[in-house]
Image (spheres, coloured by chain):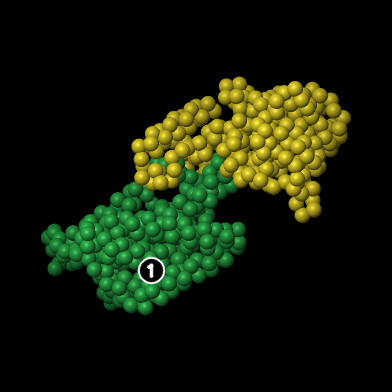
Chain colours: A yellow, B green
Amino acid sequence: MSGAQKMLLNLSDVRLSFAGNTVLDHVSFGVAGGSIASLIGPNGAGKTSLFNCITGFYRPQSGSITLGGEELLRRKPHRVTQMGIARTFQNLRLFREMSVLENVMAGQHCRTRAGAISAVLRLPSQQREEREIRKASEECLDFVGILDEADRIATTLAYGHQRRVEIARALATQPKLLLLDEPAAGLNAGEKATLIDLIRRIRDERGVAVLLIEHDMGLVMKVSERISVLDHGAMISEGRPDEIRADPKVIEAYLGQDEAEELL
Amino acid sequence: MTTFDILAQQLVNGLVLGSFYALVALGYTMIFGVIKLLNFAHGDVYMIGGFVGFAVLSLVGGLVGTGWGGIALSMFVSMIAVGFLGVVIERIAYHPMLAAPRLSILITALAVSLVLQNSVLALTGGEFTAFRTNLGFGGIALGGVFITYNQMVLVGMAAILMLALETFVTRTQYGRAMRAVSIDKDMCRLMGIDVTKIIAVTFLIGSALAAAAGTMAGAYYGSIWYFMGFLIGLKAFTAAVIGGIGSIPGAMAGGLILGLLEAFGTQIPFIGSEWKDVFSFSILILVLVFKPTGLFGKSEVERM
């Protein structure tokens, strides 16, 4: 790990087990502020579980997870989001029946100040805030390139566009770190190129660090500055894409898996 | 009176009845939306609303009168008090049960219903309490149809409340969050939405609407008693099912439709007004059999 860089997210010695089965085995790992990092590993390695620990859905038995020095562990998921971590899912989880714009507006809930009472009474301050939220949400949609679909019901959009709604919604929470869980799954080559571009712009233009779980090695190698490899719940390697590609431990972990060919 | 006049008069009666049903059905459907609970205590919350409204009116009636002004003030106070009672009920009775099997929380709701009913029974001795008001019997005649001012005010107040709710749900962050919570709670947590708080706000609003209906019904019918919430609870449930449970516009439409069907149902030969409950619940059964998702319901059928 490049100790010189200031780590935004830091996991140290995180251990998670379910009913005696170890899912994460003393995992230590970090993501530098303003960087693009990837987490790879064979299926069942514990990648999504790691995301669930970071976002507060799973409670690791021991260890520490900090964001900008602040402890995240044992905080409720909505608090973790308020502190600056947003996430998307492997399978799409948009709010069905709500419009694209409303989905993104819901993402800004944690950044709103107006309380429930002023919302019920529709005070002027609440109405002003409502306009600001709308504007910021439209900006997020514009950023991911689907502003013209703002008023459509989210689930009626093309698959690739629904993925972008998810990213826009996550950005609306104004994160410092964005976790993307298999963002390229189900996308065609053209859409993947757009995604790479989008991930870079999220970092360059918005200053948001990105950590992605991805099986598409071509995309991972192209977009990541650092890659961490998880296998059977343990971190087996960490480094630049060229280092990972050459690491025998990584190649071994992937042997017999389809991804091995892509890796080599 | 011509047949047309009779039907037009029933239209007015149906709207009044439907307004009560709709206000109570809204709470039913909102609560079902966020925690998937059929809150069988909701009718009793309506009853408590009637009693709190009555108590407030008894206190302030001397100062502000017992006309619609005084009633509106009592209704407002009752909405706030009973809204918070709803939050307390959720916190004490339902919140610890959210992770438990669905049947446990349903039984808890029945227990809450019994506690509320019996508390008021103990306090009132089970007698009807006269809800004395100073409402006139004036109105306007349109052809052969007579509409009282009371009916107009009542339907008007219900309409304002429903319009306010609709605005809240579609135009505010809290309303949006409430809809989002009813769709996917975990995703909401990841959006930084405090789901526990949104559930509390839902109980606050749902209970307040029931309290408004309870106070208005007490004033309109002139009496209240501990068991007044039972039947309207079931009717509101029917209304929510007709509209599609979980759907807010559905509860409004379902309430009005049920009120109108009941009013017109009394005019069907051989089915007098004494059969109107049979009529309503037959509709419930028909909807459950032929269109369980209701008018505005989602395709997924929720198991209880």
Q: In this view, does A193 lie to the left or right of B302?
A: right
Report which quarter residue A50 is drawn in: top right
Q: In which quarter of the image is the C terminus of chain B?
A: bottom right
Q: Is residue B198 left or right of residue B147?
A: right
Could you tell me if residue B227 is visible in this image? no
Name the amino acid, label 1: Gly
> Residue visible at 67% across and 30% down?
A8
Front position in the image: A109 or A62: A62
> Residue visible at 16% across and 65% down?
B137
Q: How crowded is mark 1: few (under 14 residues within 10 Å), some or many (20 or more)?
A: many
> Residue visible at 18% across and 59% down?
B149
Could you tell me if residue A72 is visible in this image? yes
Q: What element carries label 1?
A: helix
Q: Mark 1 lies on which chain?
A: B
Residue B76 x %, y %: 32, 55
Say if B76 sits above or below B5 in the image. Answer: above
Report which quarter residue A181 is drawn in: top right
**Residue receiving disc 1:** B229
Front position in the image: B188 or A91: B188
- Count of all numbered marks drawn on residues in the image: 1
Residue B60 x %, y %: 26, 61
Say if B64 sits above or below A182 in the image. Answer: below
Residue B190 x %, y %: 58, 42
> Residue visible at 33% across and 48% down?
B163
Residue B59 x %, y %: 28, 63
Q: Is residue A229 left or right of residue B199?
A: right
Report which quarter residue A54 is drawn in: top right
Q: Quadrant of the N terminus of chain B?
A: bottom left
